[in-house]
Amino acid sequence: MSTGHLSLQAHRLIFCLVFLSFLSGCSHIVQDEIRPSVFPKSSYTLSPSITIEESFPQWWQVFNDPLLDEYIEKALANNFTLKEGFARLKQARYFQNQADAHLYPTLDGRMRAESEWQTENNRKDTNKVKLELAWEVDLWGRLSSAAKAASFETLAAEDELQAMALLLSTEIADTYFQLVEQQLHLELLQRQIKTNTTSLSVIKLRFANGAASLIDVYQQQQLLAAVKAKVPLREARNIVLQNRLRVLLGQAPESASLALRQTLPHILTLPKLGIPADLLQNRPDLRQLQRELIAADYRVAEAVADRLPALKIGGAAGFVSGDFITSIFAEALATIIDWGDKKSEMEKKKAMVEENMARYSQRYLIAIEEVENSLWQERKHEQLLDALNVQLVISKATLRESRSRYVQGISDYLPVLTALVAFQNLEMDILQRQQELISFRLLLHRALGGDILNPERDTLAVNE
């Protein structure tokens, strides 16, 4: 074929492609920066007057607890749920590599030996060695759209991993502080048992001397038995939390107790909150949804381009029975009738974009709600603790006065028993509320977001 004839064929091919492209529709434009369909206020409803600038590499270091630091670091290295996330990230990266590879030509080598018998004694041997080059020209951006979609899906997988790490770190801290609370509860119960046992001995002595009734003895015995009955439940809860923490650390449950701090920490002033719009960048789950939305939009562009004609070019060079041959080709492919298959695929992808946008916007509202709720719950819980501590002081004074009146014979034992039960229940309640206050602070750290793992792509895949 002459060069002029080949050029004529090429021009015809290009003309057909352009004509068919107008018949098939236009390309889809994707925005790489998409915002939710909601516009919240520029600040939270609770604006604290005192904040602290976070100066720690990781959020949990504000508690200044080496044991907590150690447990979280172990969990980030050994937790199997997190390892699942690493594996999904590796899959996403390999899928992205595949999508990127489709943008470039493929080169295949082929060797073939063939024998053909024309008659019984006449055999023809043919040996072929060829290199074949093929390349789909990305005329309408189908391949590049697929590659960009895969790229954003990989980024979404990284954000998913960051979200898992953030959730894991707060769950470790919450379980840890619940364990501290259970240990303190058990110690408090032992002190209450000791106090009630001493009171029972005193009442028995007074009963022997005729200064107390048998009812007083029974009432104190009942209180002592009630306090002792709380111990097994606390011990069971302690074992459950120990097992939970070990599993989060990637370990099997065992009977040995984990090391714990001796007291619950004091809540520090609030971290820097920023504005609700900051959550879009600070929270990895919101970044994940945004990138999944952009990826879905690129899938729409891929589906739109898939309806347009495809052009493949290539060539081959090699030896056939010792003769060197070369060839080139150009191939155009366009769907004439598919009964709406590709159009339905395109519309389905558009509907998926709408779904992702709704999910992204709703999750953004929930994220703002989580920050608001944790702030207000912490504020109101602080007020509750202040009220309980005042109540504890009054209860302690009431118990002291009722005991004095009972010893003097002015009143019976019932006011003492009532005051003692109220005082011991308040001690238990305050300890529980102190732990709940810490849980609300952990919820705030989770709601504000932040990256736990090293953001570098190479260091993210530490388990590869």
Image (cartoon, rainbow, N blue to C red):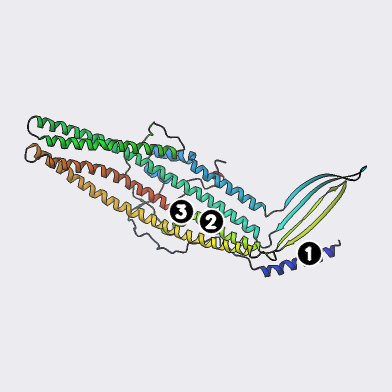
Percent x, y of residue 152: 56, 55
SS for callout 1: helix
CA distance separating discs 3 and 1:
53 Å
Q: Which of marks 2 and 3 is in front?
A: 2
Amino acid type at circle 3 is Asn
Q: Upstream in the sequence, badge 2 or badge 1?
A: 1
Residue located at (17% from left, 36% from top)? 220
Which residue is identified by label 2?
A: 292
Residue density around tag 1, few if under 14, some if 14–19, many if 20 or more, within 10 Å: few
Which residue is identified by label 3?
A: 282
In the visual, does 146 lie left or right of 437?
right
* Depth order, front residue of 321/39: 321
In this rendering, does residue 267 appear at all? no
Q: Upstream in the sequence, badge 3 or badge 1?
A: 1
Percent x, y of residue 185: 29, 38
Residue density around tag 3, few if under 14, some if 14–19, many if 20 or more, within 10 Å: some
Q: Quadrant of the N terminus?
A: bottom right
In this rendering, does residue 189 appear at all? yes
CA distance separating discs 2 and 3:
17 Å
Percent x, y of residue 435: 32, 44
Residue located at (36% from left, 55% from top)? 373
Q: Which mark is residue 10?
A: 1
Above or below, 194 against 1 in this view is: above
CA distance separating discs 2 and 1:
40 Å
Above or below, 200 against 393 in this view is: above
Percent x, y of residue 141: 65, 61
Amino acid type at circle 1 is Ala
Snapshot quadrant of residue 339: bottom right
